[in-house]
Amino acid sequence: MPYDAAHSEERLYFMTIGRICRRPPVVCSPETTLREATRIMQQRNITCVVIQNADGSHGIFTVRDLRRVTASCDANPADLTLASCMTPHLITLREDAYLFDAISLMSRRNFHRVGVVDHAGHLVGVLTDTDLLTFQTRTPLYLINEVERAASIEQLQRLNARLFEMINLAYKAGVDIRGVVQLLAHFNDVFTQRLIELLDQQEGIRLPPGAAYLSLGSEGRREQTFRTDQDSAIVYADDFPPELMPQLERFAERLIEGLEQLGVPRCPGNTMASNPQWRHSLSEWKQILDNWIGTPLPDNMVNFGMFQDMRVLHGDRSFEDALRTHIYETAHQKSLFFPYMARNIVGFKPPVGMFGRLLVEKNGPCRGRIDLKKGALFAMVRGIGLLALEAEVMGGSSWDKLDRLRELNLVSSRSLDLIEDSFSFLVGLRLGRQLEALSVGQKPDNCIDPERLPERQRTQLRSAFKGVDALLQTMRSHYKLDLIAR
């Protein structure tokens, strides 16, 4: 349905997808041939058909699938059945889900279609990215398409400025903070990947085969906000040709420069792929990890915590599994690793004094304010990550790790609910403050002035710090920290 101009952009995000998706799906059986399915799609002028599986679930076959099968099949593809070439599982959302839910899902997971089901789970339609793009050109999907078509770094810079508007709109609309942050992280990935493509196309600078560019820290967890610095590394094969090393180094240096041009600050600690100390072969990284894990000095624990959340953003993705397997196995071989890491984490106390008084920084750039990262979020991210690592849960955001810990029943549901609510509130508070700073031309940071908060938010902040305490108490008990000699 056409967009009613009387609706505000904020209300747009809370329009249900059932109001947009009105076309019933065209359903075929798994035995339908490609010849017949193609004829149906041409007659109906549609780009996909839904397949009804025997167990009641649904698959999907699209024009993209048709191109893929036609290009790769040696036999006559027209005689194949949909069962052999469809996408077996159609991702669905309920018709009462908000438009932003569909936008966020399709953006983050690079889907072009989602099924729409009613309250009983019956499929009532298929929502496409084209539906959303024609519906409203200021949706995240539209901006992502523009980023992917950007022809220069200067154009990416201009589009990056629009990212603030998009995230600010979603935040003010009251969209769930987890969805906002992960959408922001997806945008950052898209910008970085397009920058890598432009460096290749226009400057001939590319990552050689047998290597991978790693995102670390909050970028690795997909939890960036607007203050996030660059944290990255490079891993390459043990038999990587020495003559390709200058090409790898140039790629790292130029990519870091390009990201800085786009407004992503360099890491003050130089934890970046442009630093030779963060470029190593797979075997060298394993040795470094062995040292970090086996010698729990403060610097080693900080470096490990940063690297633990690594993921491959560009290059050979097999390195990600190899490194994660090594991290898990090595950490569990060292009996004191988990308690010593936990003891370091619980040393970060939330800034609350007697009678619930909020304590501000006495010195430094956050003087007179509370540093949310130092006072709460650092300990929460590291604590959640440590508990998850012990349970062999690696990768994903802190929210994803909490979901898995809940499924595994390793921590009480009551504690996890308090921890998750606190984490979400603190991340939302930080993002809101950063958006305020950007809107008036200030540099965003992690600090808030409690005196400027409404009384209701100050009360919520005190409650959130109780959630930090709940996590620290959980770790003290779980790792029996009171029994470890100081």
Image (cartoon, rainbow, N blue to C red):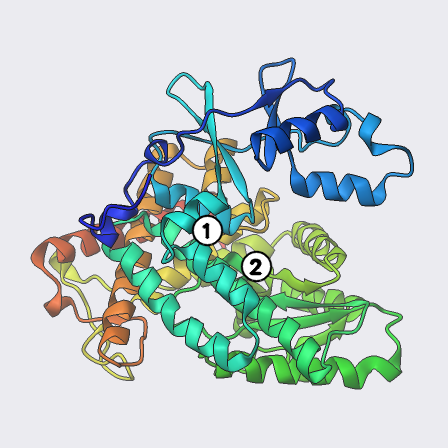
Is residue 472 shown left or right of residue 88? left
- Rendered position, 103 above or below 60: below
Of 107 and 71, the residue lying toward us: 71
Q: Residue at x 59, y 78 (%)?
A: 272
Of 189 and 469, the residue lying toward us: 189
The residue under label 2 is 309
Amino acid type, residue under disc 1 in the picture = Ser
Q: Secondary structure at mark 1?
A: helix
Amino acid type, residue under disc 2 in the picture = Asp
Q: Residue furthest right?
A: 74
Give residue 278's position: percent from left, percent from top: 66, 77
Q: Secondary structure at mark 2?
A: loop
Residue 438 falls in image quadrant: bottom left
Crowd around label 1: few <14 · some 14–19 · many ≥20 (10 Å): many
- Rendered position, 360 above or below 331: below
Say which label, 1 or 2, has the lower sequence index.
2
Q: How many marks are shown on the rendered structure?
A: 2
Q: Residue at x 54, y 33 (%)?
A: 91
Give residue 227's position: percent from left, percent from top: 38, 72
Q: What is the CA distance from the residue labelled 1 to the residue labelled 2?
A: 10 Å
Q: Which image quarter is the N terminus in?
A: top left
The residue under label 1 is 398
Give residue 165's position: percent from left, percent from top: 31, 66
